[in-house]
Image: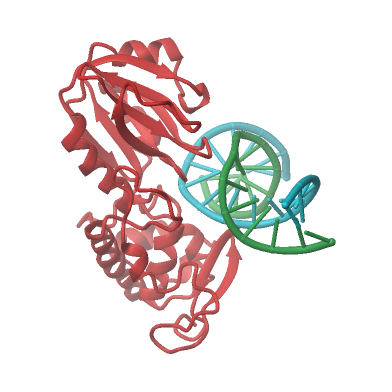
Chain colours: A red, B green, C cyan
Amino acid sequence: MPELAEVETVRNTLKKRILHKKIVDVKIIYGNIIQNDLEEFKKALINNEFKDIKRVGKWLLFELNDYYLLSHLRMEGKYFIKNREEEVLKHEHVIITFADHTDLRYHDTRKFGRMKIVKKEDLKNTKEISKQGKEPLDPSLTSSYLQTKFKNKKGPIKTILLDQEIISGLGNIYANEVLFASKINPLKCANTLTKEECERIIMTANKIIKKAIEMGGTTIRSYTSSLGVTGHYQDYLCVHKKEGDPCPICGCLIEKIKIGGRSTYFCPNCQK
DNA sequence: AGTGCGACCCGAACGC
DNA sequence: TGCGTTCGGGTCGCAC
């Protein structure tokens, strides 16, 4: 489940492997991944090269000369680099072939991921990017920013933390972990959070995201190693997927509930 | 304007 | 063992 930390890991790994290699072919096996006209998509890539890879929230931005290739991994998207001759696997949906006979292959068992080509000058008007809120590690993410954003949100804080237009990059795993570390009940209405609680969210989100990036993200399900996403932050999780386990702080049993249709894990004693 | 929920997917986990 | 059913996860689009 790639969140900000996992996407950052993929970005760093891919940067070492695919920049400045000429793209000679693009094969689209499952077209629904791509939000452009398929021929336009191919045309933007072929005979071009990736100059850099950036990241905004959970979006990867592959920089070309005139375009960005935006890629969102959603649940299970991942990239592999393989030799062109290797057999194409069932869940490989988009294959970008370089002149050196290697492929960048997009693999996604659930087909949830999305790709989109946008002209560079249109990037700031692209809603996927322009609507992203502040990232956890952005110093301009302050408690007054959060309080302003939370002011008219009466939903549970857990749901609001997943809103990418407020904080960009948190997913279900880190939202659960941040609220635990902040000692805030996930059901608490966002507009009732104090300035001090907002500060705790920022501080713990910083700590957790930094550590998660350092550990290469979280690998929940046991996959064979995929490019850049075999992280080790799962060894540091306190509550996520830990229902019935003792809380590492007080020993009370971790509970699992549904908030906004999403699994939410918390300690009923530490997060009153 | 904000809020809630179904749709998108399919492998894993579960129930019988 | 084998079959059918349910679940999950991020985001979008639609209905209210």
Residue A65 visible (yes or no): no
In the figure, A106 relative to A255: above or below?
above
Instruction: Return the residue nearer the eye: A195 or A247.
Output: A247
| Horizontal side of residue A258 vs A2, given as left or right | right
Residue A89 visible (yes or no): yes
Residue A202 location in percent, x, y? 29, 65
Q: Quadrant of residue A68?
A: top left
In the figure, A149 relative to A21: above or below?
below
Marks counted in the figure total: 0
Q: Residue at 32% of width from left, 14% of height from top?
A: A25
Q: Residue at 40% of width from left, 35% of height from top?
A: A128
Q: Quadrant of residue A77?
A: top left
Q: Quadrant of residue A119?
A: top left
In the figure, A198 relative to A248: above or below?
above
Residue A181 location in percent, x, y? 36, 75
| Horizontal side of residue A103 vs A75, given as left or right | left
Residue A92 location in percent, x, y? 44, 30
Q: Residue at 48% of width from left, 28% of height from top?
A: A33
In the figure, A68 relative to A153: above or below?
above
Residue A171 location in percent, x, y? 42, 55
Instruction: Return the residue nearer the eye: A93 or A33.
Output: A93
